[in-house]
Structures are given as C-alpha cells and as structure tokens.
Image: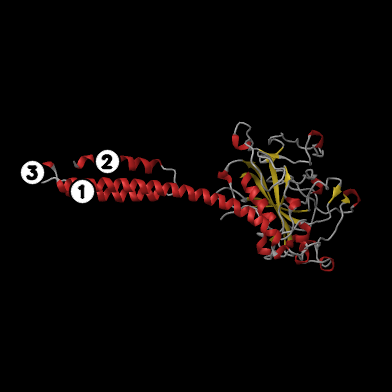
Amino acid sequence: MCGVVNLVPYCNLSSRSPNPFRSHFLQIEVLTQQQVLFLLHTMCPPASDSKPQDNTKLKAAVGFLSLATIALLASTIALAVSGNNSTTTSSEASSATSSDFSSSKASSNFFASDDANVCAGAKLAFDNQLCADLEVPGPQAGGNVTKGYVGGLAVDVVPNTKPYYQSSMCPVNVHWHLGSEHYSYGEYDENGDGPHGNIPRPDWAARDLAAAGETVPDGFRCHHYDASDPKFTTPYEWKHCKGMEVGETYEVHWPHSAAGACGTVNQYQTPFYDGVFCNLDMDAFSTLAAQDIANAVGVHGQVFTIVNDESYFYPDMMRGMIIDEEMGMGQDIAYYTGSTTGETRSNEMCSMYTPITWQVDRKCHMISASSFDKLCYDMKMQRDDMSDDLHAHGSRELVKDDLVANNQARKTLRA
C-alpha cells in the first residue's frame, strides 16, 4: 500500500513551471518530499521486519498523505497562477506609471512657470565665422581620434584629462548625431556599415547625403552591423525617441560645464548652450583665458550601433559616457581641444565656441534601442523642454588636419 503514493506529477509541474517563483516551489518540493519519505519509512518498515498486523492505520496514513499531496498540487498551481498574474499586473502598472509620469508633468508646480528655469536664454551668442577670415582659427571638432594621430594646428592649450566631475563640471545636456562625427580607424570609419550603407573617407569632401534620401548630413559607421543578424534588422517600437533606427550608428555627446546648474532641477537644458553658460554672463566670460575655458567646459563623446537586443540594455544614459571596464566601454579615451560641432560648421565655416575639451571613446559599442528610448523618456522628464534633442542631429564633416589641435592625449583607463 505504501508504494502507491506518487509525487511525480507534483515534481513535473514545478520543474516545468515558468513562474518567477519556481525556486520557491522547488524548496517546498524538497522539504515536502523529505517529510513524506520520513513518514513513509516510519509507517512502512522493510518487508523482512514486518509482521502481520492491522492495516487500518496504514490505509489511513496513505489516504492522509495522498490528500496532502493533492493539496500541495493545488496550492502550487494557485501560487503559479498568482505569480503570473502579479507579473502581468506589474508590467501593466509600469506601463501605466510611464503614462502617469508624462501626464503628471503637465500639472506639476515644478513646470508651471518658465521663470523657474534660471538657465533659459543663458546662451552667449558667438556666430560661426569663415575659417579663412580668421587670423588664427580656434581648434575645431570632430577630428580624427585614431591612436597616434596628431592634428596640424599648433596650440598652447591642453585638454582637461581628468574626469569632468573632478573639475566641478556636470553634464548639462545630451544629444546625438547620425553617424559618427569623429573618426577612429577600425571602429567608426569608411569601412563600417549600416542599414543605408556608409560614406567614403573624404578627399577632402563634404558628407551631405541629402541627395541619397538622408534628411541630415551623416557621419561614419561602426563595424558591428550584420544584415543577416536579426538584432540589427528587427524594428523596435519607439515610444519616446524620434526618427531612430535599429542597426544605425549614432555619436552621443554629453556637454559638461562648471558653470551649469549642477545638482539642481535646471541642470539639463536644450539648447545645450543654456546649460553651459547658465551661471556665466558675458562680463565674467570675457575675463577667462583660453585654458580656463578648456578646463571648465568639455564634452564626452561615445559612438554606438543600435541593436534590438535587451542583453545590451543600459538604464541611465543621461549622466555621461558609459564607463564599464568589463564591457570595455569608456576605457580607451582620446583627449584634445576643439569646438562645438553640428552640420552648420564645416571646413570652411568655423565654430567660435572654442577651445573646449573633448574626451572621446575610441571604440564603438552596441547598445539596445530600449536604452535610447529610456534616455529619451528621461529627457522628457526634465524641467526644461528637451524635445528638440529627441532625434539625431546632422553630422559635421570630418575636420581637416590643419584645423585640428596638435595637443592629442591618450589615456587607457584602469579600474
């Protein structure tokens, strides 16, 4: 009679269950089986030691254990269903929360008045100038950051090679460009690829592909793209970013400033100039030497290929370059002084926002589309309206050697 008690159905259920509480079920299973085996051993001695006796108690025990097994099965199924329901509810709640946060911003006192944003309109205006008209043009960006490269413009300013926070600088904006504005041979260059191909290295030529259907001038591509791999081709349902595409290369910039509204609700600004100059008026700016500016204003640059693969998800792209030794991110950095970038500047039209420090990751990295979408959501939650930075901006053409500073420095980070 003792041999008819069968726990196999219960074991099979727990081992197949996809429920997130499966490990908890397994623990219950082990303890229950130990208890049952102990009871069975106590009530069912070995056949050689058994003597004729009344089986009433054994039948009752077996019946009790059978009922207990059925009860455990029922409770296991109930917990599994409850767990699944909880997971679904959690997911639904998360989605609802995102919607609630967005709608809450419209009614929040933090966003009720534009006057509360002390950085609004703080930009100091310095118009682009024809490079040829400048007696000595300031160093420009983005340039070649390949290891060993040295620019052709002699300067007496050096880049800030410390982590920006050590110079009391904070990120005041985040935005990105289609393709890479910088050039790193073997990482993001003319040999890379993407959903719409790449561009050749200039002769020296502009990189505006508007005639080919691009909406903004684009830059170089990384080497990750593989049209046969679905993570580069499976579309992503974008909820917050605009005009982004899986498989494409983007260069992300995080402007930093010691004059930003660091540590306050006004820290992040669009346009980024408002953040850079938030606590610096023209009178104060005019007292600064070129080296003072390079020490107090800088940009993080990091290049990514977007993939539809959650194993490349990173939850916080707001705060600057991703530094991760295990992933090889932010470890091989090029330092130099340059200028602001963007499609309004070229090798004929120079930016006057110079010299500023650039710290650029020489490597290209894969990042999930959801990481960017989370970034765009975080940008929407700032006090300032950052909607003009939720899409890729155009890329400046690769800067000629004679406009790139000759002060390149390199530092390979070690944890």
Say what amino acid the circle numbered 2 marks.
Answer: Asn
- Contact? badges 3 and 2 (CB < 8 Å): no
Residue 304 x/y as whole percent: 66, 44
> In terms of secondary structure, where does tag 3 sit?
loop
> 99 or 167, which is in the foreground?
99
Residue 139: which numbered mark, if any?
Answer: none
Secondary element at image label 2: loop
The residue that appears at 33% across and 42% down in the rendered structure is 11
Give the amino acid type for the residue marked by disc 3 in the picture. Answer: Pro
Of the numbered discs 1 and 3, the one sitting upstream in the chain is: 3
**Amino acid on which disc 1 is placed:** Ala
User: What is the distance, in whole Å, between disc 3 and disc 2 at their CAs?
Assistant: 25 Å
Q: Is residue 16 left or right of residue 104?
A: left
Left-right relation of 278 to 237:
right
Q: Which residue is mark 3?
A: 52
Res 123 → quadrant? bottom right
The answer, for residue 316, to whether it is visible in the render is: no
Q: Residue at x 65, y 63 (%)?
A: 166
Q: Residues within 10 Å of mark 1 (few under 14, many from 20)?
A: some
Residue carrying label 2: 6
Distance from the alpha carbon under mark 2 to that under mark 1: 14 Å
Mark 3: few, some, or many residues within 10 Å (few <14, many ≥20)?
few
Front one among 122 and 158:
122
Helix, strand or loop status at disc 1: helix
Query: Which residue carries the number 1 mark?
Result: 61
Question: How would you rate the neighbour count of disc 2 (Cα within 10 Å): few for under 14, some for 14-19, many for 20 or more?
Answer: few
Q: Is residue 25 among what the camera can see?
A: yes
User: Mark 3 vs mark 2: which is more N-terminal?
Assistant: 2
Residue 55 or residue 301, whichever sits in front: 55
